[in-house]
Amino acid sequence: LITKSGFIYFNEHSFLGSQDVAGDLKVLETEGITHIVNCATGVPNYYPKKFKYLHLEVLDLPWTDIIPSFREVHNFMQDCVDEGGKVFVHCNAGISRAATFVISYMMAHHNMSLELAMATVKSARPKVRPNMGFMKQLKFFEESLLNGTY
């Protein structure tokens, strides 16, 4: 994991950060980003002609049901990786929503426990802190991965 230009990448294909980076064309192009997951509310897809977007307006509230969006985000991220691209996942601050999607992706596609995925992301971006409701859902998601129901 490397911290760079206000965002982190946890492997050669996947990056996490805030809306500030999402609006910085120079940084996105320098890093070779090809796909962007925008899970912020009120933040446009700044460069729709330059990048492939998945835009989900997810509220950062403890009662928001985020699990139903996992599969769509994971598939988008994995398709990007399979195409040899680089995906940037962002919300407004890159702390709760985007981090929840990245952590769940690491759990599902890199066979990490919630504890390890969280520690891995926090080691590169210490301010990551999914809200309480998202943490409960990540624990439930971990159980569904372990018992094969995802």
Image (cartoon, rainbow, N blue to C red):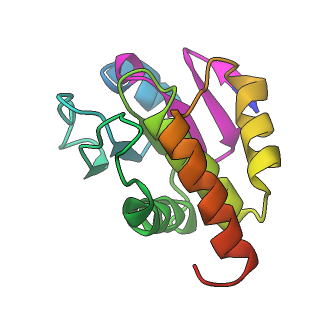
Q: Quadrant of residue 60?
A: top left
Q: Is residue 68 left or right of residue 15?
A: left
Task: Answer above or below: position of 15 versus 56.
Answer: above
Question: In the image, is 89 to the left or to the right of 47?
Answer: right
Residue at the spot 25% in from the left edge and 48% down from the top edge: 55
- Residue under the image location 60 percent in, 53 percent down: 138
Asked if residue 11 lies in the magenta stretch, the reply is yes
The residue nearer to you, when weighing 7 against 107, is: 107
- Magenta region, residue range: 3-21
The spot of residue 63 in percent (x, y) is: 37, 44
Q: Is residue 1 magenta?
A: no
Q: Residue 117, image x and y in percent?
A: 74, 46
Q: Quadrant of the C terminus?
A: bottom right
The residue closer to the viewer here, 10 or 113, is 113
Q: Residue at x 20, y 30 (%)?
A: 46
The image quarter containing residue 38 is top left
